Image (tube, rainbow, N blue to C red):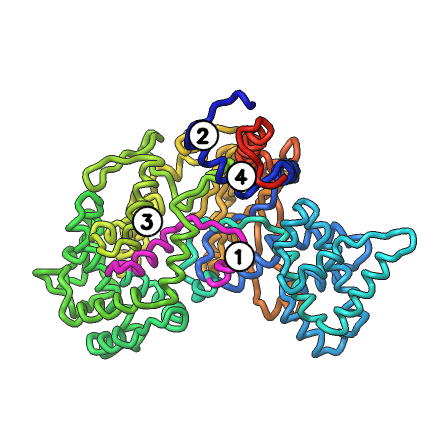
Amino acid sequence: MTGMKYTDENMKYLRLLAEKYPSERSLTREIINLNAILNLPKGTEHFMSDLHGEYEAFCHILNNCSGVVREKVERLYGDTLSHDEIKELCTLIYYPVEKLQLHKSEGDADARWYRTVLERMLEIARVLSSKYTRSKVRKAMPPYYEYIIDELLHAQKDEDDNQVTYHDNILDTVISLDADNFVIALAELIKRLAVDRLHIVGDIFDRGDSADKIIDLLMTYHAIDIEWGNHDILWMGAAGGSDVCVAGAVRNCLHYNAVRTLESGYGISLRPLVLFAEKIYPDRAPMEAALAAITVIMFKLEGQLILRNPDFNMDDCLLLDKIDPSRGTVLIDGREYPLSETAFPTLDEQNPYELTDGEREVVRGLRAAFTGSPQLQKHIGFLYERGGMYRVFNGNLLYHGCVPLDENGRLKELSFFGKTYSGKALFDMAEAHARSAFYKKEKEQRDLDFMWYLRCGENSPLNGRKTKTFARAYINDESAWHEPKNPYYSYYYNKEICEMILAEFGLCSEASHIINGHTPVQTVKGELPIRADGKLLVIDGGFCKNYHAKTGIAGYTLIFNSHGLRLKAHQPFASKEEAVRENSDIHSSSEIVETEGRRVMVYATDDGEALQNEIAELCKLLDLYRGGVLTPKER
């Protein structure tokens, strides 16, 4: 290699690298270390989608790693512990703080109990740590206990049992001084080692009332990416200052009885809206009046947006001007429907999309509350930092909604702001506008408007259907509720179409898959989450309780480890209290999607590719040292 010629840029980089590795020995040590990592099994990836504010169910699935922890416990202790003992141990790992309190209140947390528990948890951690380097495992340990845990995990029997005695003495001291905190630390380490990376494939917000708690938890997670969903983009637009997104987010909170998210989670008061609504609808309960008022405001603001953005092609949503107050009807696609709501006191028939002075004041106050909420701004900033419209990771393509297609199954060409986009370019353009809507100091109205289009546009990659919010709000006839979907949702059963989509995003391997959220799998009707001969997997988490009757289960998650892909179907979660008290777990059944012929090692992953590139650069530097071109700073 010494005969190789390097550009000035190459040499500049290699000289900088030499600052970090100033000797041949430091270089060879690092090359050996990185090569060793390449030949370890890949870490487990955990895919979840459509959390919809259901904090307790999400937290439980996160704690049990979609059943991975229980599987490890059963594999280790299935022949030596009873079914109840296994459930007890698993619950302790899931909820160590609450479970310890329960044991102490029942008086059975003595020294013998602690020793048994700690030895079992150490063995579980030992098994889970086997596919990581010792250095990575130490970094995963809680900092106050890393030395002790490291010693206990690697204690070995010797001829005089000195190590065993040393191990026992450490445990005795831990039990006498800090047993509870050590149990908690081990439980966190086990869960940390069980999953190497978490993927959230969209829709953290709406329906449930604890989206803020979910994001607080995600912000502490060791390795995570987020693919934005249509409900997330609504809140992102609201945080950026889009009036219609603000109105939509408030309406959802009122409609789904999730006001806690707004008021307790983000400190956004609904009092001005409620006071205004009580004047407009004096015969209604305060929150009912607030919902009625914000719904009209939202449709007015949406109408203004549609009129100033003709390329959104959303004219079919302009329905306030189709209302006939005297008849109590609305005209949609040539058909007249009776309205379930006939009181529209703020609607001007001559200017139906114009806000009244009172409505403007409400909107102004709500916008200021959303853009001025420190917690909301921090959470939305996190979604931007860790998120995007899609992600290509370890040979798989992750996105929430759809890749818009035309009737012939080709990538649909869509025109926005004077340019035409399709496929990957459409996603990239959408992400650029979404980022501008939040980060630009001088906001452009078109960026803010586009956030609403991404939320509910017929050809939005995050939605992909004609939304009928007006019909659902004001018409009892459910035939008006039908929401025609983009052809994507018919074609994504076709393997060739899915392979075409994967190729559009640069993936041509037989081992590549599309991981898709957004649409609940209706298991009760015989729907399956595996589509296109295994090329596409729908993992709508089904966390939302309102969906359980429709789907028959509580949704799917996905595990991708070194042995292959497994879909996990989950039953509904009762409550955290019941889980702690009764050792109840979410019942999950596993379906193997794909088993690897050979175990997948780190070298076959994205991280592995980066490590191989790093090794190549280190080898170049070593070559320069040995060829005398550069002089090591340390001899």
Mark 3 or 2: the one toward you: 2
Marked residue nearer the N-terminal end (1 or 4): 4
Q: CA distance from mark 1 to mark 3?
A: 39 Å
Marked residue nearer the N-terminal end (1 or 3): 1
Q: CA distance from mark 2 to mark 4?
A: 44 Å
Three-letter amino acid code of the residue under disc 1: Tyr
Residue at point 20%, 66% (across, down): 342
Three-letter amino acid code of the residue under disc 2: Glu
Q: Is residue 481 above or below residue 565?
A: below
Question: Residue 217 at x, y = what percent?
Answer: 50, 62
Q: CA distance from mark 1 to mark 4?
A: 33 Å
Q: Is residue 525 visible?
A: yes
Mark 1 or 3: the one toward you: 1
| Mark 4: few/some/many CA within 10 Å (<14, 14-19, 20+) | many
Q: Is residue 612 visible?
A: no
Label 3 residue SS? loop
Q: CA distance from mark 3 to mark 2?
A: 30 Å
Q: Is residue 166 magenta?
A: no
Q: Is residue 232 magenta?
A: yes
Left or right of 336 in this view: 200: right
Residue at point 24%, 35% (across, down): 420
Q: Which mark is residue 482?
A: 3
Label 2 residue SS? helix
Q: Is residue 302 above or below residue 12?
A: below
- Tell me if label 4 and label 3 are in contact, CB under 8 Å: no
Which residue of the protein is positioned furthest toward the top in this rendering?
A: 3
The residue that label 1 is drawn on is 221
| Mark 2: few/some/many CA within 10 Å (<14, 14-19, 20+) | many
Q: The magenta stretch spans which residues? A: 216-245
Point out the image quarter for the C terminus: top right
The residue that label 2 is drawn on is 499
The residue that label 4 is drawn on is 18
